[in-house]
Amino acid sequence: MKTLFFSLMLLCISGLMAQTISPEVLQNIQKKYEASNPNQGIINALHNNDMNDLTVNANNQDKPDHYFTYRVKTKGITDQKSSGRCWLFASLNVFRPQVIEKYNLSDFEFSQNYLFFYDQLEKANLFLQGIIESADRPLDDRRVEWLLKNAIGDGGVWGGFVNLVDKYGLVPTEIMPETNSSNNTRYLSRTLTTLLRQYALELREAFKNKKKPAELQAMKLTMLANVYKILVYNLGEPPTSFNYRFIDKNKEAGDIKEYTPLSFYKEVLTIETSDYIMFMDDPSREYYKLYEIEFDRNTEEGVNWKYINLPADEIKAMAIESIKANEAMFFSCDVGKQYERGSGTLDMDNYDYESLYDIPFTMDKKQRIQTFESGSSHGMTLVAVDLNVSGEPTKWLLENSWGMTGFEGHLIMTDEWFDNYMFRLVINKKYVPEKTLNILKQKAIMLPPWDPMFKEDK
């Protein structure tokens, strides 16, 4: 009681006493509002129109053109439908052009559904293992809370793609096509989340009742069998082998071969996933450092999300070299900010909220990250750049996975928007300077999974 009294006294002395909205305070607020000279025309418009329609910047109607100095050769546009699997589409779209060129195809698509199946199974295992390992902690422990809030989801990052493809390989979309549940993941995710939380309580109760580690693992195996059952019912059962042949754009068919998913992956793509490095421009943290996100992976034995933090200009220089060499890149950003859907443009001047309300919005990228205002929300594939006469980028082109929306299935991003809302870019190490590669030799700074900036791409 004395502690509370002294705390209140200190607040009063310092002028920080909590203020309620009393009738007097409300009257003061109303007077300040009246003093702001409210515009009845704007009020009327907002009551009857979409806010974005009223904030379209009339001084920014000259949209970027569709010309790009350098552009990766790509074909076809994919569609993730009503799912959060953009990270799988973006990752696979990095390599899809290579297969099309190698086999002289008119189009080609990997099965996102195949990798999604194993992503969900592996995430379920990772969650249940995390529950077992934290079973001695109370339910309100921060790690336990984080696990229960993030039991499973359909989002992800590049590192999750690497974990899956190196372990399970790849198959063409014809071998494991999309289903209604893969295209519309909401109800599947909801069902799995509910079941896993139920299983979490059962495992914690078993631990409380002194079950041995082997018994807990046996319980987990039975639980995973039920998760597998739900996934098969909704997505189909992944193939362990299959017959396939390529038919080129001249309708000439190659030989039918028997593949496993891993042998197909090794034949069609001559890559090492370890050759690819994730970069971020996070001004809230020290640059030229290596960071790792704890528990941010989708397989128990897989790699966590690890990245080098660099200023945007240095990331852009490497990206330009990759595009010049006809190699696309995994790219993720805060896509909802200043996005004009009709033209498919990402431009800092698309919408003018300040003029509408006569209120300044002043946060920079660092402040937006620190306050949870901004973070990566969507993954795409970076495929083109336009340079001015000085060789500096003015705009970029992103291959999206929302079907034929925007500019022919793409988004056009100004260079200024890149600076403000780009978060992740994955680049082959052959385009990375030696001094930057040396950062990988550092011991990674470990960040907790609940860090403010780190969201999964959907």
Image: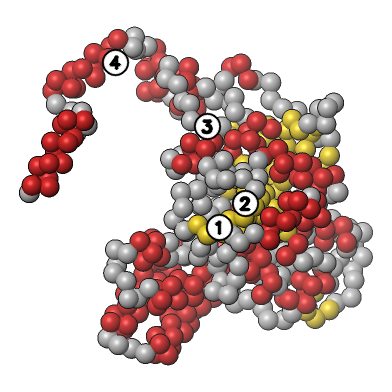
Q: CA distance from mark 2 to mark 1?
A: 8 Å
**Earlier-in-chain disc, 4 versus 3:** 4
Q: Amino acid at mark 3?
A: Asp
For label 4, count other residues whose C-alpha is less than 10 Å away and answer few (under 14), some (14-19) or many (20+). few
Mark earlier in primary sequence (4, 1)? 4
Query: For residue 445, which numbered disc appears in the image?
Result: 1
Q: Residues within 10 Å of mark 1 (few under 14, many from 20)?
A: few
Judge whether 97 appears above or below 66 on screen. Answer: below
Disc 2 target residue:
289
> Mark 1 or mark 3: which is in front?
1
Label 4 sits on residue: 33
- Residue toward you, 332 or 314: 314
* Depth order, front residue of 436/143: 436
Residue at mark 2 to residue at mark 3: CA–CA distance: 21 Å
Q: Are marks 2 and 1 in contact (CB under 8 Å)?
A: yes
- In the rendered image, residue 326, in percent from the top left (x then y), is placed at 84, 49
Q: Are marks 4 and 2 in contact (CB under 8 Å)?
A: no
